[in-house]
Amino acid sequence: MVNYDELPLFPLQTVLYPGMPLPLHIFEERYLEMIAQCIEHDAAFGVVLIRSGSEVGGPAEPHTVGTIARISHTEELPDGKMNIVVIGESRFKILDLRRDHSYLTAVASPVVDTSDDDADLLMLHERVCDLFREYLKTQLAMNNRSLSALQLPREPSSLAFAVANVIDVSLDEKQVLLELGNTALRLDFEMDLLSREIRSQVRRPVQTETAKGAGTIHAVDAAEIRTLFSRN
């Protein structure tokens, strides 16, 4: 169930995409309360990238477009904290922020892609698949690892969100990928990003998980890539 009239929000320093998994470590009291409510009522919540502020402690101002998160796995810890895994569903747009609870809620509306040209999608799908394999090969080789085979999603929208989830670019660029109006635009932008990253062979420092809320940007891992794409 998605209550767009009072959608609980989880502002994070990450972008969740439709169809993609995200592990979260829940330890703040306000979010333990929010997740408990979602579990009790079998309800979803919204994951939104933080525009300003921080994940922990004080208030955070989110971007206006986020992704509905459905809880797929929970693990209650002895200290009262919780680990959960969520799966992204559809996108939404915040119409009005509410601060009536310990956590943010919003009046929101669904975001739906505009239609695409099938011929354009076929060409873009093939090109992004080629570039993404090259990108992964380069990234993994930098760490003396390899990926012998990878079955990429055949459905263009699934491919676009999966690539967006994996590619190691800035959070601002990841947010742009979320907000673009259709799959063709998303794949076209990914062609530019992948080409740039392949040319530059930039290797950003690995960010390890700390006492924060969730999935940080991380180095490409062969086993994780196989697991991710086996979902599509």
Image (cartoon, rainbow, N blue to C red):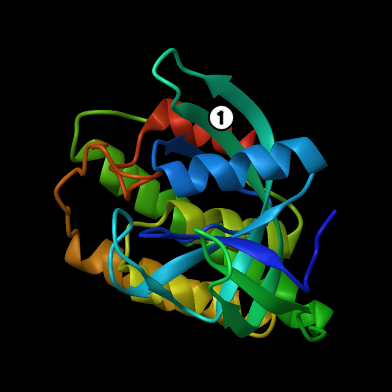
Identify the residue at horizontal 54%, vertical 57% (top origin): 16
Question: With respect to residue 34, does 77 lie above or below?
Answer: above
Q: Is residue 86 left or right of residue 199?
A: right
Amino acid under disc 1: Thr
From the top left corner, tell me how far across and down residue 113 is, in percent: 76, 80
Please give the residue where the numbered disc 1 appears in the rendered image. Answer: 227
- Report the residue at 65% width, 27% height from top: 73
Q: Nearer the viewer, residue 152 or 62?
A: 62
Q: Quadrant of residue 120?
A: bottom right
Task: Say which of 190 and 10 sits in front.
Answer: 10
Q: Quadrant of residue 188?
A: bottom right
Residue 222: x and y in percent read 40, 30
**Label 1 neighbour load within 10 Å: few <14, some 14-19, many 20+:** few
**Quadrant hosting residue 109:** bottom right
Q: Which quadrant of the figure contains the C terminus?
A: top right
Residue 84 visible in this rendered orientation of the protein: yes
Of 50 and 187, nearer the camera is 50
